[in-house]
Amino acid sequence: MNARALGLALLITLIWGVNFIVIKWSVAGASPLLVAALRFAVAAVPAVFFVPRPRMPARLLWSYGLTVGVIQFGLLYLAIQLGMSAGLGSLLMQMQAFFTALLAARFLGERIQPWQVAGITLAFAGMGMIGVLSGGDLTLISLGLTLVAALGWAVSNLIVRASGSANMFSLVVWSALIPPIPLTLLAGLTDGWDAVGRTLTHSGAGFWAAIVFMGLLNTVLGFGIWAALIQRHGASRVAPLSLLVPVFGIIASALAYQEAFPPGKALGAVLVFAGLVLHVFGGRWWRTRTARSVA
């Protein structure tokens, strides 16, 4: 990757990391499900008028839209409103990598490699430590919702695999048409239609700027540039840079919300991140070690 491509990749991971504090700010005084609905509405319109529909069955498009929109982001926004910190949330969402490996082994017959077993073990140990030792600043319901959101992300990864060679950017834009209606209905049922109406009619410029940031910069621009970088430079070079998302998320949360990491929470976060690094890079280390042993 040249300097320009690397700079763009770093910019996108920074946007995705900062997005977690934007989520936390935006759901402070509004229904989290409505905020998620607005995010996808802005991501879909007007982009769908300029982006071709992805070549994939409608059932997969709908499945992807509901899984990502309602389960992944709907539950993530709800978890953040219920106490999940922006920094820790950005890290725990990366559990999707381990859930994806486990689901692929169960439903696609893929073999889990030794380094993946080690990474999964480290990450789940860290997750358990966060749940038990993080103290009163983290509720179990917010932790559980975040992990279910990560599981939804993993399911969407399998849907992408099933879609074959569908254009990822087209998939992101067109699938964004699907979540706004169910998310808005759920927001009205859980928070009341008066609250939905107040958010839509009385929110200030800062709230709508956050919606535009999440919908356009984080979703449309972010995924558009990321897909282009992968297409040009290959997933093996670009995808590992996503490890920087929780790094930027934790830094941004520390600066914006003075997020603290007590010893138990910090050690758990380190174990999760170490497991993630092992999951991503372990194959290279394993093959290098095997080649040296053979030599």
Image: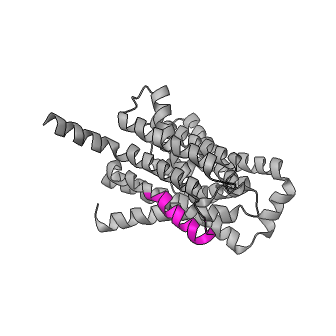
Nearer to us in this view, 275 or 136: 136
Residue 19, located in which quarter of the rendered image? bottom right
- Regarding residue 165, the answer to whether it shows in the image is no
Q: Is residue 245 magenta?
A: yes
Q: Please state, as top left, top right, bottom left or bottom right, where the N terminus lies in the image.
A: bottom left
Q: Position of residue 7 (x, y in %)?
A: 37, 67
Q: Is residue 130 magenta?
A: no
Q: Position of residue 181 (x, y in %)?
A: 72, 48
Q: Position of residue 270 (x, y in %)?
A: 48, 53
Q: Please state, as top left, top right, bottom left or bottom right, where the C terminus lies in the image.
A: top left
Q: Is residue 14 left or right of residue 197?
A: left
Q: Position of residue 245 (x, y in %)?
A: 48, 58
Q: Residue at x 87, y 58 (%)?
A: 194
Q: Residue furthest bottom?
A: 205
Q: Is residue 259 left or right of residue 185?
A: left
Residue 195, located in which quarter of the rendered image? bottom right
Q: Is residue 96 left or right of residue 26?
A: left
- Regarding residue 262, the answer to whether it shows in the image is yes
Query: Please, what is the dominant secondary structure of the magenta stretch?
Result: helix
Q: Residue at x 68, y 49 (%)?
A: 142
Q: Residue at x 49, y 38 (%)?
A: 100
- Compared with 32, 109 (above or below) is above
Nearer to us in this view, 220 or 284: 284
- Which stretch did the figure color magenta? 244-259
Q: Is residue 59 left or right of residue 284?
A: right
